[in-house]
Amino acid sequence: METKQIKLNSPEEVMDFVGTANQCDFDIDIFYNRVIIDAKSFLGVMSLDISKNLNVAYNGYNGGLENIISKYAVR
C-alpha cells in the first residue's frame, strides 16, 4: 500500500484529482484524521477540509495517478 500526502486548494483541483482517480481500476482512499473517503467521489473529497494536507492511500499503479499526485504533493 502506497501512501502520499497532497494538498488540494480549490474545487477545480479536486475535480482534476477525482477525474484522474476514476480512471484507475483499483481502490484509492483519501483520509484526514479519522475520516476515510473514496477518492473517486467528488462530493466525498469536497466534504473534507481541503485547506489541510490530505493523505492518499492506494494499492496499484497508474501513470496518470502518479503524475497528479506529484502535481499536488506536499513539499
Image (cartoon, rainbow, N blue to C red):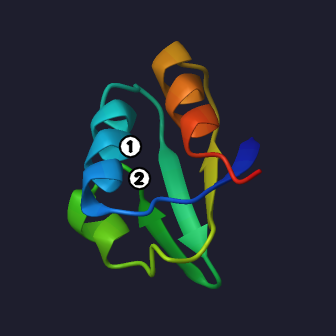
Q: Mark 1 belongs to which amino acid?
A: Phe
- Name the residue carrying label 2: 39
- Name the residue carrying label 1: 17
Q: Residue at x 56, y 60 (%)?
A: 7
Relative to 56, is 20 above or below? above
- What's the mark number on residue 34? none
Q: Position of residue 16 (x, y in %)?
A: 31, 41
Left or right, residue 24 beside residue 58 = left
Q: Secondary structure at mark 2?
A: loop
Tell me which numbered mark, 1 or 2, is placed earlier along the sequence: 1
Task: Out of 55 and 60, give the one closest to the viewer.
Answer: 55
Q: Residue at x 27, y 56 (%)?
A: 41
Left or right, residue 20 beside residue 37 = left
CB of mark 1 within 8 Å of CB of mark 2? Answer: yes
Q: Mark 2 belongs to which amino acid?
A: Ala
Task: Out of 70 and 34, give the one closest to the viewer.
Answer: 70
